[in-house]
Amino acid sequence: MIVFDNVTKRYPGATTAVDGLSLVAPKGKLTVFVGPSGCGKTTSLRMINRLITPTSGSILLDGEPTDRMDVALLRRRIGYVIQHAGLFPHRTVVQNVATTARLNGVPKAKALKEAHELLERVGLTQSFADRYPYQLSGGQQQRVGVARALASNPQFMLMDEPFSAVDPVVRGQLQDEFLRLQREIGKTIIMVTHDIDEALKLGDQVAVLRTGGKLAQVASPKVLLARPADGFVADFVGRDRGYRFLSFAALDGSLALAAEPTVALGASPEEARGAALDRWVLVADAARQPLGWVDADALREPIREGDLNLSGTLAPEGSTLRHVLDAALSSPSGRGVVVGPDGGLLGTARLPEIVAAIEDARAGAAA
Ligand SMILES: Nc1ncnc2c1ncn2[C@@H]1O[C@H](COP(=O)(O)OP(=O)(O)OP(=O)(O)O)[C@@H](O)[C@H]1O
Ligand SMILES: [Mg+2]
C-alpha cells in the first residue's frame, strides 16, 4: 500500500506542482493518475521513490514513511518505468533487463536467465534478447522497460506513461497484455497517463488531478463515469460517459432473465411455431447451447443450419450490461441470449429488464 498524506510540492518561483495530495493506492491494485499536462502527475510519482523531495506532507510505503528509509533500499523495492522506456543504449535488451538484479548482487547467470523469462512474459521472443535498443520499435522498447521494472520482483511499480510511444492498435495490445500480467502478479502499481480511456481501462481506481496539482476525484472507473465529482471531472472523462459506464457494470444476478423455449435442429415448422413466444424461436443443441434464431412464421421446411442466425445476440454471464444491451438490440427477437460459463442457455433478456438492471447499477455506483 502506498499512502500520500497531505503531500505538497512547491518549486522555487511559486509553481505549486502538487497541492495537499492525500490518497491511498491499495495493495495489489493498479491506481492510475490522470490529468492535463502539467498537473503534477510525474512529480507525484517521483516523490514516491524520492527522486523529488516533497515540500511538506509524507508518503508511506506499507505504513512506513519513505523519508526515513535508506534511498537505495527504497528504490530497490520499487520498479520504475519512465516515459520512452529510458533503456541503456549500449547494453543489449537482456542486459538491460538484468541490470537491476545485477545491482542487487544476483549472480550473472541467474540474472540473465530471469531476464530471458521476463522478456517472454512481456511478449518478446528470444530473438530480441541480444539486440540493442535502437534495433527495436518504440513499443518493443517500452516492453523491455516494463520487463526491466519487473526484474528482481519489486513489491511496487511506478509507471510514467508506459504505453505512450506507440500507435493506438499496439497500445491496445500492450494494455491487454499488461492487464493479463497484472492479474497474475498483483503488484501495487501507480501508473501515470493523460489518456482517460487508458486510465478507465487499466485502473482499479483512477485519481483525476487538475492543474495546480489538486486532486479532483479518486474513484473506481465505474463511479467516475456514473458520478463525476464536478464539471471538471465530467468534462475530463468525456463524451458518452453514460454509455461507457455500461462497460463497467457487470452482467450478474441483478438482471431478471426470462425462460426461453428452444427447439432442436430439424424441428418442423409446426413445432417451431408451437414453441415460439413470437415469430422468433431459439434453436439449441442437446447441451442447451444456443445455435441461432429462426423466423418460425417464414419456415416452410424443417430447420436447417443455414436458417440460423445468432450473430451478436449472445452475452456470457459475467460480461457487462453493455454487452447484453447490445445483444438485445442486435437480436431479431429483441431478446439477448445469456449463457453460462459452459455456454449453456440461462435465459433471455429484453430491453425493459436490461434498463431496470442499468438503473440498479447506477444507483449502486452512487451509493
Ligand atoms: N524542476 C522544476 N522546477 C520548476 N517547476 C517544475 C519543475 N518540474 C516540474 N515543474 C512544474 O511543475 C508542474 C507539474 O509538472 P509535472 O511534470 O509533474 O506534470 P505532469 O502532470 O507530469 O505533466 P505531463 O502530462 O506534461 O507530463 C508543471 O507546471 C511544471 O512546469
Ligand atoms: Mg509527466
Image (cartoon, rainbow, N blue to C red):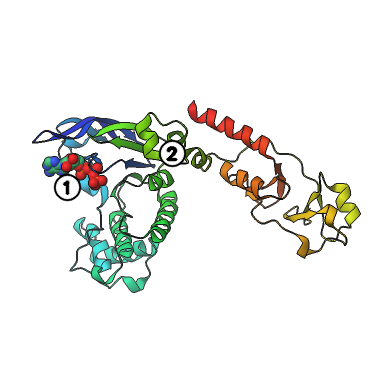
- The quarter of the picture where residue 134 lies is bottom left
Horizontal placement of 279 versus 3: left or right? right
Mark carried by residue 169: none
Horizontal placement of 365 versus 145: left or right? right
Q: Residue furthest left?
A: 12
Residue pictured at 70% horizontal, 45% vertical: 334
Q: Give the residue type at disc 2.
A: Pro
- The quarter of the picture where residue 292 lies is bottom right
Q: Earlier in the sequence, mark 2 or mark 1?
A: 1
Q: Which residue is mark 1?
A: 72
Cβ of mark 2 under 8 A from ligand 1: no
- Residue 62 shows in the view: no
Q: Nearer the viewer, residue 255 or 68?
A: 255
Look at the image and tell me in which quarter the N terminus lies: top left
Residue pictured at 30% horizontal, 59% vertical: 142
- Residue 344 shows in the view: yes
Name the secondary structure under disc 2: helix
Q: Give the residue type at disc 1.
A: Ala
CB-based contact (under 8 Å), mark 2 and mark 1: no
Height in image: 243 above or below 216? below
